[in-house]
């Protein structure tokens, strides 16, 4: 079918014939099929990826030993030490050395208690007599 | 000859060397189009990184020169022809893919793999347009190069056109980039027409955290899967996944940084400018160019509709429904079509964030269009 003319010259035509050739509809269908197969395989691989990773990591990494179990009641675990060191570093932002990290003893808490008591007393509101 | 006549003849000689005597209506129209591109880029923010170089290139390519002066991309030995060599031989597109790979995060795709299929469905636009071009008596090679416009991937379109139909390269490149820039205009009406309000309101489950090992394993495995089935995609897919591996392995940060910043910027400038400069009116303003533009528009619409309808079809069998708007992101205009999905989704529900989910079919679309291009090349190059 002739669609357009320009100075008596055919500009473009319309025909369904090429559709039925090997390079027509069969190739278009095959092209879509290949795209779906490739991306479908990719979907399968991605779905299996977490399991593959879990398998490989369980095969190579020895099971973790509970660190806290070996510690005494008054000892601080290694992880907690790292967290404290990171918190100190983030707060100070300067070169420093942590000399000691230990839990509070009842004596330490006594000083805190004394300080808190004095603080509260300094804010005592004068009592008003009820009328 | 008196002094006045002498001066007049000199002015006449000089005028003959200017661009004005050779300026035809076609050149003037193309210069206006170039200015239009620059206007759209600067004031409407339509793909400015592409349209500014292309628009200026269009203006440069349509300034007529004397026959003795070798200046245009079509003149043997001209500076512009050397720069155009990268377009003509398909050098720039793989380098762009390297940069895209180095800036792409496949995590959302890895966390929700079924969305990858939307990127495959959107390639329907490529193959239906291929058939459409065949019915309009384009050769199979030309039809393949035109069809890939539906992949909405400028570098892929340029790469395939340079391999299969170099004569149509300018028209195909301009059509591909123009429609990529017009994604926010073309896609929303189709997305709204094919979906109900209830479908547009569907919320997606948050993505899971993807481990570094998965992100490293993916580009290597995906490259093997793609290229074993479609070896024609080795250059594009290879560079895409190589760039991504450089990003994810974290031991080549310097290389990844260069690939996704300085290198891709330089190549984008050269590619855009040279493609624009190749649109000389004498080569570009032909009836076939108009046909290519028409087929490109149809191709984009079919690709968008294909993705949305496939998402709806998936919902028939899926227990956990997906928002069918995501199907439109299967068109691989990264990240524009994903942004359009977010925009249309938020028009219905301002608290529904689809952008990250839309990136999954979006990057899958890049892979899908490169596989389609590789497949067309391997079949039609024979």
Image (cartoon, rainbow, N blue to C red):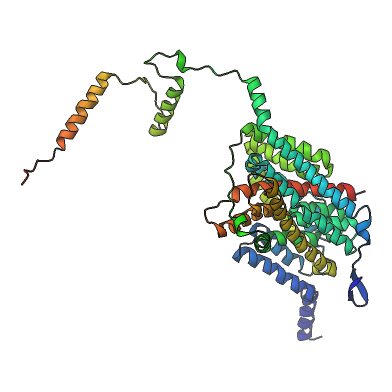
Nearer-the-camera pick, B320 or B378 = B320
- Give residue B183's quadrant in the image: bottom right
Residue B95 percent location from the top left of the image? 73, 46
Which residue corresponds to the image point at 78% horizontal and 42% vertical from the top-left? A38
Residue B285 in percent (x, y) is at: 81, 69
Image height check: is A77 above or below B14?
A: above
Residue placed at 72% from the left, 35% from the top? Answer: A45
Which residue is at a point 64% across and 66% down the rendered structure image?
B40
- Percent of width and height locating residue B378: 87, 46
Image quarter where the N terminus of chain B lies is bottom right
Left or right of residue B92: residue B360? left
Q: Is residue B124 visible?
A: yes
Q: Residue at x 66, y 55 (%)?
A: B337
The residue nearer to you, when weighing B31 against B203, is B203
Q: Quadrant of residue B129?
A: bottom right
**Above or below, A74 relative to B380:** above
């Amino acid at each position: 079918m002739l669609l357009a003319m320009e100075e008596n010259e055919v500009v473009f035509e319309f025909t369904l014939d090429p559709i039925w050739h090997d390079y027509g509809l069969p190739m278009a269908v095959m092209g879509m099929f290949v795209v779906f197969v490739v991306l479908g395989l990719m979907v399968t691989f991605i779905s299996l990826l977490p399991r593959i990773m879990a398998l490989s990591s369980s095969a190579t990494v020895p099971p973790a030993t509970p660190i806290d179990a070996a510690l005494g009641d008054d000892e601080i675990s290694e992880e907690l030490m790292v967290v404290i060191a990171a918190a100190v570093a983030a707060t100070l932002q300067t070169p420093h050395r942590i000399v000691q990290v230990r839990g509070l003893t009842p004596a330490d808490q006594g000083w805190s208690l004394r300080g808190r008591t004095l603080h509260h007393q300094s804010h005592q509101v004068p009592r008003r007599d009820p009328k | 000859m008196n002094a006045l006549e002498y001066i007049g003849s000199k002015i006449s000689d000089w005028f003959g060397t200017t661009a004005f005597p050779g300026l035809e209506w076609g050149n003037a129209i193309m210069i206006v189009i170039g200015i239009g591109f620059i206007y759209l880029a600067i004031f409407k923010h339509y793909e400015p990184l592409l349209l500014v170089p292309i628009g200026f290139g269009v203006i440069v390519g349509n300034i007529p020169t004397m026959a003795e002066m070798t200046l245009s991309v079509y003149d043997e030995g001209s500076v512009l022809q050397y720069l155009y060599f990268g377009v003509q031989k398909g050098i720039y597109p793989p380098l762009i893919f390297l940069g895209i790979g180095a800036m792409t995060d496949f995590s959302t795709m890895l966390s929700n793999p079924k969305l990858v299929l939307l990127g495959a469905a959107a390639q329907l636009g490529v193959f239906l347009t291929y058939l459409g071009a065949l019915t309009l008596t384009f050769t199979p090679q030309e039809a393949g190069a035109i069809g890939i416009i539906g992949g909405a991937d400028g570098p892929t379109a340029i790469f395939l056109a340079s391999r299969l139909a170099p004569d149509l390269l300018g028209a195909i490149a301009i059509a591909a980039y123009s429609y990529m820039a017009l994604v926010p205009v073309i896609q929303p009406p189709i997305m709204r027409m094919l979906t109900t309000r209830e479908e547009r309101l569907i919320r997606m489950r948050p993505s899971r955290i993807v481990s570094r090992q998965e992100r490293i394993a993916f580009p290597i495995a995906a490259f093997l899967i793609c290229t074993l089935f479609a070896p024609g995609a080795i250059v594009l897919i290879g560079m895409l996944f190589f760039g991504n591996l450089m990003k994810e392995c974290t031991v080549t940060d310097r290389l990844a940084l260069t690939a996704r910043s300085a290198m891709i910027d330089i190549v984008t400038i050269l590619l855009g400018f040279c493609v624009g400069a190749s649109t000389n009116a004498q080569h570009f303003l032909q009836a076939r160019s108009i046909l290519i533009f028409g087929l490109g528009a149809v191709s984009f619409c079919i690709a968008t509709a294909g993705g949305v309808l496939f998402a709806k079809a998936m919902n028939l069998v899926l227990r956990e429904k997906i928002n069918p708007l995501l199907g439109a992101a299967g068109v691989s205009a990264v990240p524009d079509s994903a942004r359009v999905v977010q925009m249309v989704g938020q028009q219905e529900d301002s608290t529904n964030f689809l952008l990250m989910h839309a990136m999954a079919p979006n990057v899958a679309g890049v892979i899908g269009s490169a596989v389609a291009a590789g497949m067309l090349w391997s079949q039609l190059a024979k």
